[in-house]
Structures are given as structure tokens and as C-alpha cells.
Amino acid sequence: VWIVFPPTGRLFTWTVIGRTTLPEFSGRTPYGVGVIELPELAVRVVGFLDHPPDELEVGMPLAWKVVANDRGEPRVRWASAKSDRRDA
Amino acid sequence: MTVKGASRRACVVGVGHTEFSKNSGRSTNRLAFEAITAAATDAGIQPAQIDGLVPFVYGPGAEDVMAMFDLRDVRFTAVPHLGGAGSVAAIRLAAMAIESGAADIAATYVARNGRSGARIDKRVLALPGQALRQELEWVNGMNTPAQWYSLICRRHMHEFGTSREALGTIALTMRSNAQRNGNAQMLGRTLTMPEYLDAPIIADPYRLFDCSLETDGACAVILTSADRARDCFAPPVAVIGAAEGHPDSADDIANRPDFFDTGLTKAAPRALSEAGITHSDVDVALIYDCFTFEVIQQLEEAGFCGRGEGGPFVLDGNISPGGSLPVNPHGGLLSEGHVGGMNHVVEAVRQLRGTAGERQVAGAEVAVVTGWGDMGDGSIAALART
């Protein structure tokens, strides 16, 4: 059974990764990774944050989309769901 | 421990270690051989008398040690499953073996080339929950303990106002303590708060000096019963209480109903109750400082201060050598070296023997040692001079 995430969640906590040993992400530092709350599903998920690391805040609304990485593999990315987002 | 009689109470009678470095230049088997030999010499026993072995989850196994010392009749082996919390959990297993009569003389050890050999991002490949790690975390850019635990640290900062200056106080205290330890990797290398605050980001809020050292080296600890301990060289140090615990859930930090719940939250009351002591009885604490914030979290979850009070507790100087609860006088994993936390056990024993030299905590009679591992597993042992 596949369950589709609700369109938005909230940032519960996050880190900014300055060094990585994962080749897929080596050119992207610094980048944010967060724990995102999805209250409708009573679950929290780990997600890559497509948002400026110095503008992350606990509680900020986030929306997900699926993008292809450099090898064409699907990856989930979370971006600000605020209407006044500054990184648009 | 369930003490059937005082004569069978488990005691630490020998501790030993190698030098700690970035490149040992020799195998982990060789490092284990040297540390166990040093511990046996310290105890005044022959390695051939060892009949119980409790290896660390990574590194030389029990059969390796049997072969290197030609041990003829090892009667007890066990490996605890708590990652870095395994060292203190191993003390408990060895003590249980002694007290039950399953072994007469038990050795436990950590030996690794943690810098020149398999570094942390490779060692964690042996952790449980690999499908979760690789399919739900690697694809999102996360694969190391610094990154996992920094998520807990950030949430703690958000809920309780824990500051980077509090984290820095831990880093600076460990660095300062290491200057009184001839075996510390950071001997002679001072650290200031501006240097701490401006260091490169590893996994923010963790920067370089929030992270423990990656170390080549080995430590070994030998235990026996109180009656046999009378024949050993050094004054025995009794294991008066020990426990392990695992958080809910064991392999996933993100979905814990109580985000700060750890194995230590469960284990600490069990160990202190068994030991028959309260927090105020503890003269020196060896807290598993894999990263700075884990000291705050473990001080809280072990009950040395309330949840959310760890930052102010540290900022008020309580963990410094002259404070109410001196923590890691040897400099800890942050500044002595990271030998899976077994170096914390070695330091606790030296403090209780009164042989810690210029870093001796005056009159230390009771020590607590904690372990932290994997996704928040916890272990704790209370040790006392006899």
C-alpha cells in the first residue's frame, strides 16, 4: 500500500550539513536536512531542504515536490510553503 | 548486579591502554594485545588466566584474543549491541559473568584505528536499521552521527534556549582538562571561545570543535570477584550498579514520541537504584562526549539536572574540575581521544584509585560512567573505591 504525503508539513528540527561523504551531495554543501512533521499521517520524515540554510526556522511550513537527481533518480525536496517566501 | 555475596562482587582490578594517535602504524589486533597485556600487568595476573571476554561490537573479536594469548578455556563471551554505549554495557556484562560464576577473570576492550582505518562514516555501515538509513536518510543527504544528533541538539536549543556558548563551554572544559593528561591527543593545543564559535560547520549546530576526535588506540579493563581481587596489585574498584537501555524506537530518531528520550533515560534510575546511591553521592562523572550536546542531554537524562537545565548547568561551571560535578577530567572523547568510551572507564578507575595525578578529583569515592551509541542507546555504570 502506497500512502501519498499530504502536500505540506512543518519543520520540526533541522541541521545544516557543511561536509558530506555522500557523492550525490558533495557539490551542494552547505545544505539543510530537516525532520518534517506530517500531522495528518502522525509521522515525521527526514527531508532535504531546498531553502537557504540561514533562513530555516522550527515550525516553518514546507511543501514537497519530486525532482530528478543528476542520475535521473527521483528525489523528494522540501521548499518553503509560505506565500511570502523570499527564495522564490 | 545481583550480588549473591560480597565475596563475588565484581571489581575492576586492571586497566590498560596504548598511546592515542591519528596513525598507530599497527593492526587493531596488535593494539588489543598491547592494551590487554597492560591491563593484566596492572592487575598482577597472567593473560592466560582470563576466562571471560566481552569484545566491542567493532574490532577484534573474542576468538582473535583467544588466539593471540593462547587462552585455553574461555568460558564466557558476549557482545553488547549498543554501538558506542557498548563499552560501559560491556563492563556490566563482564560483571554479571563474574557475579554469576560464569567466569573468574573477564577482560573487555576496545581496539581500533578510528582515524587511519575505518572512519566513522564507514563504521556506521554496521549499524542496525540500514534499510531505513540508506533508503530514507542517505537519499536526503544524511549519513553520519554528527548529522543525526545535531537534529536533537537543534530541537533542544529551540525548546529550552540552549546556547552555542553552553556547547562551547563543554568543548573548552574538555580541552582545558586534557592539558593535565600526558596521553591526551590535544595536549598542548589550547582552544578559545572565539575559535570554537568560528570553526567550520560540520553539521550545524555542530562545528569542528563540537565533534570528538577520531582516534587510533586501544583500552582494556579486567574484572574479577572481590575475593580474587585481594590477590591483585591495585586497590579494587567495585561495580556497584550498572544498566543499559534503548530508546523508543531503537533505530529511528525522527519519530520518537518524546524527542529527547534516550536509552540512558531508562538505564540511569536502574543503575543508581541498584548501587543504592543518589546523584549527590557522585564525586566524578565520565560522560560520553561524542559531541558537545550529548553531554548536556546525558546530564539531563541521567538526572544530574532537569530536562532543559543542562545548558545553564554547564554555563554555571558545574562540570569544571572545581565544580559540583567534575566531568571527564582526562579531557574526554573531545580532547583525550575516542576509544569507544572505554577510556572513560579507565579514567574512572584511576580517579577512584587516587592515581590520576594533577587531574585527581580530591577524595573521589564514587564515579558514574555513561555510554551513548547508535541512535541513542544508553549505558551507565556506578563504580566505587573499596
Image (cartoon, coloured by chain):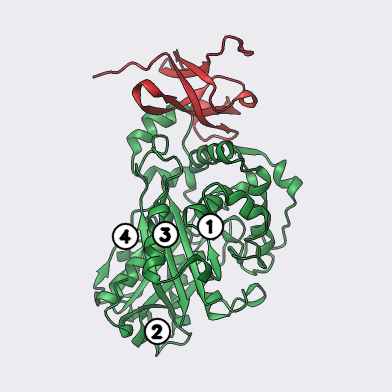
N-terminal label among 3 and 1: 3
Label 4 chain ID: B
Lateral position of residue B300 relative to residue B313, left or right: left
Mark drawn on residue B338 = 1
N-terminal label among 1 and 4: 4
Mark 4: which amino acid? Val
Mark 2: which amino acid? Ile
Q: Is residue B56 above or below residue A67?
A: below
Label 2 chain ID: B
Label 3 chain ID: B
The residue to which callout 3 is attached is B268
The residue to which callout 4 is attached is B79
Q: Position of residue B18 (x, y in %)?
A: 53, 68
Q: Is residue B295 above or below residue A54?
A: below
N-terminal label among 4 and 3: 4
Mark 1: which amino acid? His
